[in-house]
Image: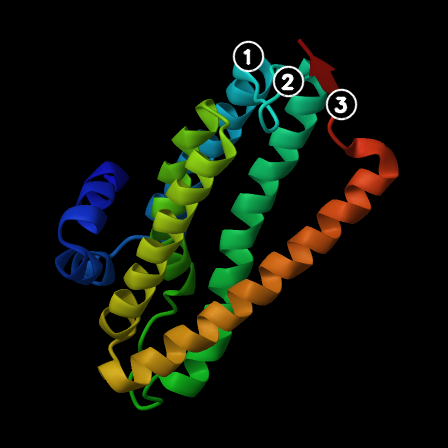
Amino acid sequence: MFMNHIVGIFSNPDNEWARIRDEKVTISQHCMTHTLVLALIPAICGFIGTTQVGWTVGSSDTVYTLTTQSAMVLCILFYGAMVTGVVVLGKFIDFLSVTYQDKTENTPLRGISLATYTSTPLFICGFAALYPVLWLDLILALAAIAYAVYLLYEGVPILMNIPKERGFVFASAIITVAMVMFVSLMALTVIVWALGVGPVYITH
């Protein structure tokens, strides 16, 4: 079922957001299943790219890879961070929805649905990790982020049943929360690496 949503999110996002809104399913039936499966893409591709393909720095011919054990630990932590991030962001969206949604309507909480499907381009972009070239991966990541932001601004008013003007402000608040979460994740990464769970390199 979630594969249909992936196609729709890229081909006709407005109609797909309306379909997601009208579905009578639980979070675990399509949102968390979607996230748990798609979050495997960057984790697995990152493991393969960093252990089997490797990368170079500048004009040097030296190829760097990670040890299997190091890459495995980092990819598992990365996978957990992605799934946790979607859930936490979804809960924040539900919290913020009290301010932006019409209090007279009995609208179900859809924060995790919004966070889940907005993250789809970022998960799909994870295929780029199979070929870890900085400039290429950066371009693809920026394109994925741009489309995710577009999906957010298009999806908020549809999924939350609010006017577009209010949806714009709501989506902007969500982006602010997401940026704070990203900075917090970077700080946590530094702490984890300082504790000895950082990458272990091999040169070829």
> Residue drawn at (34%, 52%), measured in percent from left and top?
117
Q: Determine the CA span between mark 1 and mark 2.
A: 7 Å
Residue, x 77% and y 47% (percent of image)? 190
Q: Secondary structure at mark 3?
A: loop
Quadrant where the C terminus is found in the figure? top right
Residue denoted by label 3: 200
> Is 159 left, or right, of 93 in this rendering?
left
CA–CA distance in space, label 2 to label 3: 8 Å
- For this rendering, which residue is in front, 129 or 44? 129
Q: Earlier in the sequence, mark 2 or mark 3?
A: 2
Determine if residue 28 is in view.
Answer: no
Residue 45, image x, y percentages = 47, 25
Q: Is residue 198 above or below residue 48?
A: below
Q: Earlier in the sequence, mark 3 or mark 1?
A: 1
Q: What's the residue at 53%, 45% (across, down)?
A: 83
CB under 8 Å between callouts 1 and 2?
Answer: yes
Give the amino acid at mark 1: Gln
In the image, farthest residue toward the top:
204
Nearest the eye: 3 or 69: 69
Callout 3: few (<14), some (14-19), or many (20+) C-alpha neighbours within 10 Å? few
Q: Is residue 3 left or right of residue 173?
A: left
Disc 2 crowd rating (10 Å Cα; few below 14, some 14-19, many 20+) is: many
**What's the mark number on residue 65?**
2
Amino acid at pointer 3: Val
Q: Hey, which quadrant is residue 41 in on the image?
A: top left
Residue that mark 1 sits on: 52
Q: Which residue: 59% across, 57% down?
A: 182
Tell me if 19 is positioned left or right of 37 in this view.
left
Under mark 2, the amino acid is Thr
SS for tag 1? helix
Circle 2: element type: strand
Taking the view exactly as shown, the residue that stands out farthest to the bottom is 104
